[in-house]
Image (cartoon, helix red, strand yellow):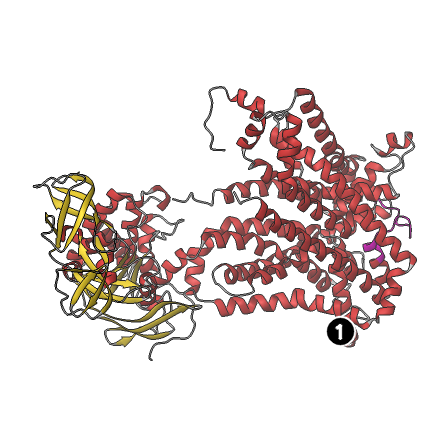
Amino acid sequence: MNAPQFASSSARDDLRTEPILVRVVIIAMAVIFLTVFVVLPLVVVFAQAFSKGVGAYFTALSDPEALSAIRLTLMVAAISVGLNLVFGLVAAWAIAKFDFRGKTFLISLIDLPFSVSPVISGLVFVLLFGAQGYWGPWLQGHDVHVLFAVPGIALATIFVTFPFVARALIPLMQEQGTQEEEAAISLGASGLQTFFRVTLPNIKWGVLYGVLLCNARAMGEFGAVSVVSGHIRGETNTMPLLVEILYNEYQFVSSFAIASLLAMLALITLVAKTILERHLDEGQFPRD
Amino acid sequence: MIEVKNILKKFGAFAALDGVDLKVDSGELLALLGPSGSGKTTLLRIIAGLDWPDAGEVLFDGESALAHGANERQVGFVFQHYALFRHMTVFENVAFGLRVQPRTVRKSEARIRARVKELLDLVQLDWLSNRYPSQLSGGQRQRIALARALAIEPRILLLDEPFGALDAKVRKELRQWLRSLHSEIHVTSIFVTHDQEEALEVANRVVVMDKGRIEQIGTPGEVYDHPATAFVHGFIGESIVLPVDISDGCVRLGGKALNIAANGAASGASKLFVRRHDMQIGPAGSGALDGAVQRVRSFGPIQRAEIALSAGECATVIEIDAPRDRELQTGDIIGLQPRRYRIFAGQD
Amino acid sequence: MSGGAARRSTLPGFGLTMGLTLTWLSVIILIPLAGLFLRTFELSLDQFWDILTSRRTLNALKISFGLAFAAASVNLVMGMIIVWALVRYRFPGRRLFDAIVDIPFALPTAVAGVALTSLFAQKGWLGAPLAELGIKVAFTPVGIFVAMIFIGIPFVVRTVQPVLIDLDVEIEEAAASLGANRWHTVTKVILPSLIPALLTGFALAFARAVGEYGSVIFIAGNLPNVSEIAPLLIVIRLSEFRYADATAIAVVMLVASFLIIFAVNRIQRWAQTRIPAH
């Protein structure tokens, strides 16, 4: 990569590339594959949503069930993102700014929800709070509803989105080191002052990145929430769950209308993610 | 006045500081000098409150400093890599220490601004006050770091290899500048360096450290001319080191007796330390040692020669510096007499 | 107060942040997982075995693991082709295609599920022409296979991409100057250095496909023993209040995922010893 540039770099490239026929075939295979498996599904969502016209589309979205699902999704996402943001900041501070044994183990524990199937993520909460769960009888006795109610959905969503903010912040904060914080302390700042005035501004892109991914997953989670929600119409259906219900009832336009909202969320997330990645690559300000 | 008593600091089994005692007078500029691993930075950080000793005391004007964290000790710390706050302008960096003070003691914003300007003028970088650290050169960053540390009116200024990350020319300039700054503001200052030239040039007193212990404390002159231990002699200035044996007050090199006084050195295996320029040359046989000139290089007023010593079974090659008045040629046999030398006992 | 201060850190807040971290971690992760394992231990070994070896369970596990392996293999090959085209070649729309690789990762699984079903159904845009050829995709195991391919696309591509980008130009030139033709250079010099990343990507795609639920259940027929995936069986057992069965299957899947992750870490460590870090 640090080899000298020759006058004709194409001569250099010729050594390193394949005959044109091979190239065309490879590109064609890649493009066709991605078109079939990624582009078409995305297009189908919107095609189906608008298949009966724009009017039908908006009617579907303003249906009370749809609105209630949107409200629930937003609320659960806000709770999960909020809590996991605080957790992520706290955990990243503990892990990145101090030395202690068992750090790798702790990080692996935090990463756990990533490697667990969504259904199992829901299952664990059913085992705790379900009618035959450990605390089931107690909860029933006190008329507290966790499963088939918002708290259960929130818990399952918090579980699956747990690592996102921490994972975005930990490597970033580790890379930035502790020197600026030490300087702040030596100048008389307290711990909180140091965190808010010195650390936070340095990690703001990382925070945004983690929040973005956390939110996308929180709003789109299906498997875990499906297990704990009970699918009670108008009450415990998030947007992904409503998509399923409407689809199974052959209400395709409505189903895909809501699906299209989620698809747009995914696209916006990807765009924002790309922009943030560029900021993170620069390390915010170039180092000496 | 800073006092450090019997400080012990271990990292696992490794003793970074092994019983260190030190007194720093008000207003002096002190250098902690030593190779890497000598413990000098650890000591500095302990004084600052950025690290904690396993045993021992640190007293500021008689009061224990260990009861307070770094943010309460009123020390100014200048880091080797500056540690400027990258998202703040130069002005905000320097103002930081003043802005985080508790409300009861905090100055008004107007007075803070005035003080920052004063400090930026002091380091002659007022024109950079709206820039960001990434837009400054290394030397400029270090001066801003210094201004930032001085803003809080510290009772002691600590500098960790302040010029280590800069290139040679900038380093020299900043050295002079630090010295003149210190004579202007007279704040007690300790700086850590592994560069002996820097320590000897800048400091009032030098503390030579090795392997977690203090080898010698003294003025630059004392440390250079009267090194207390073999380490100091070898670390400061260039030395010729010869393994000798002392018995009955007689100094032997490789079995052959040398015609030099033992000066009360204890019997047994020892090392003879001579500065390169303290070897007097004369005709063969005229001195304590004889040697054959292997190679000569001229440097301005001196010539540097590699001499192969012939002393009993010992065949060593040493380097000496001699004046140019008698040009040496390869192959000459000459006599060498140490004018000034030290003998240190034992050693590996 | 004399010196010899106890172990203190320079930066404040360790106790508080560590405490909060461990508390939150326990509440959200450790306690729920403990519940799972406790429930498992309530079963005797015989019971456990019976559940696992029941015909329906075995078939569900076979379908999940088998099809996931096949889908990951397809992603291995296609992923390599895609990443090669994206990194090595220039063509119109390259940046766009590079961006859309992430879509299967970002798209909510339910959306992917209904979209793929609609696409491959008998009357779907792709399902119709395939039906003409006598290939039925939706509501068959083939549908499961297709959905698993969809969600695995980003794993191989994104894992291999940085490695391929960082590959030393001079190595290829050395091979060429020594007389290797292009085919030899690619297969004997470049591909071997990509093997750790390829294996990692494969393992990640495999692990994800095994546990996938939302993208798959719409397009799968969900017929027991034929096109029923293990996660679906867990959900069914839960709705039947057969918690023990659900737990047993879940534990098997968990253990398998951990083994895969463990293998991935091992591969990466092995790779680091063979190939020095850049």
Is residue C225 shown in magenta?
yes
Q: Among all residues in the image, which is located at the extreme left?
A: B325
Answer yes or no: is residue A65 visible. no
The part of the chain drawn in magenta is C219-233
**Quadrant showing the N terminus of chain C:** bottom left
Name the image quarter holding residue B19.
bottom left
Report x, y in % for residue B311. Answer: 21, 54
Question: Majority secondary structure of the magenta segment?
Answer: loop
Vertical side of B264 occupied by B185: above or below: above
Q: B248 or C49: which is nearer to us?
A: B248
Q: Secondary structure at mark 1?
A: loop
Q: Amino acid at mark 1?
A: Trp
Vertical side of A106 occupied by C185: above or below: above
Name the image quarter holding residue B78.
bottom left
Crowding at mark 1 (Cα within 10 Å: few <14, some 14-19, many 20+): some
| In-image side of B206 versus A8 (left or right) | left
Vertical side of C264 occupied by C52: above or below: below
| In-image side of C5 versus B333 (left or right) | right
Report x, y in % for residue B186. Answer: 17, 60
Report x, y in % for residue B346. Answer: 27, 67
Is residue B54 shown in magenta?
no
Q: Which residue does the image show at 56% across and 25% down from the upper left?
A: C177
Q: Which residue does the image show at 75% across and 68% down from the upper left?
A: C37
Chain letter behind tag 1: A
Q: B180 or B325: which is nearer to us?
A: B325
Report x, y in % for residue C138. Answer: 87, 40
Give the residue pinned by disc 1: A135
Answer yes or no: is residue A170 visible. yes
